Amino acid sequence: MKACLKRLHVLKCVNSEHLLITLHSLDNFLSGKPSITVLMIDSISAFYWLDRCSGSTCSVKQEENARRIAQLLKSIIAEHSLVLFATKQALFQKSQHKPNEVGDIFGDSHETSSKKRRFSLSLGIPEHQEFMCKAWKKLVTYRWVLTKKSNISENGKYSIIQERLKDQCTRECVFTIQDTGIVVQ
């Protein structure tokens, strides 16, 4: 256990500017440590509201740090062949679909969206509503949604939904946490 913890490096940032500076210095740090292959960020959306309330009324200015962070992460991941795991709160949910919604007018793929919507609803998970900047959205290749089953017959069960974003391939894994560890159903 001690050997594993020696390989763990924890950096704490207090705002998005600090995260940006930390990522710049992380690039140099990683150059000297080729054995590091995973980068984890908890939570990538931690400074979302601070940036939104930064005083600017322009959404481009409000998202400037998030965009720069996403671009820098993309560069670091590519240069150092890293896998990035980042948590993000599900702050917003899509509203129920109604015929002739604005998305339909602008050519949203109704068939694909409808299939995804039915799958999400059948599993009892809310549809994902992205709130991060476009640069972040382009960086994400897989999304995992962790939920706790809420109905009585499935009390104590959790679910992880994995979605591969390029083709919207989705699958679910249901599990429980017991004294012996994680038990996949």
Image (tube, grey):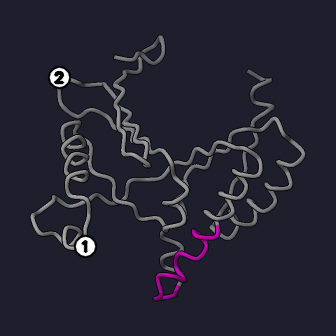
Q: Quadrant of the N terminus?
A: top right
Residue 91 vs residue 64, the one in the foreground: 64
The numbered disc on residue 153 is: 2
Q: Position of residue 38 (x, y in %)?
A: 68, 39
Question: Residue placed at 15% from the left, 59% from the top?
Answer: 97
Mark closest to the chain's N terminus, 2 or 1: 1
Image: magenta residue range: 55-68
Q: Position of residue 105 (x, y in %)?
A: 19, 73
Look at mark 1 in the image and give the residue it sits on: 106
Relative side of 42 to 35, left or right = left
- Please determine whether, in this image, residue 40 is positioned above or below residue 6: below
Relative side of 104 to 148, left or right = left
Q: Main secondary structure of the magenta part?
A: helix
Q: Dot 2, how many residues are within 10 Å of its Cα: few (below 14), some (14-19), or many (20+)? A: few
Q: Does the magenta portion include 56?
A: yes
Q: Position of residue 99 (x, y in %)?
A: 9, 64
Q: Dot 1, how many residues are within 10 Å of its Cα: few (below 14), some (14-19), or many (20+)? A: few
Q: Position of residue 16 (x, y in %)?
A: 63, 67
Amino acid at pointer 2: Ser
Question: Residue placed at 64% from the left, 42% from the top?
Answer: 83
Residue 38 vs residue 141, the one in the foreground: 141
Amino acid at pointer 1: Phe
Q: Quadrant of residue 92?
A: bottom left
Q: Does the magenta portion include 7?
A: no
Question: Distance of mark 2 from mark 1, alpha carbons?
Answer: 41 Å
Question: Residue placed at 81% from the left, 31% from the top?
Answer: 6
Mark 2 residue element: helix
Residue 58 vs residue 149, the one in the foreground: 58
Residue positioned most to the top: 180
Relative side of 46 to 111, left or right = right
Q: Quadrant of residue 177?
A: top left
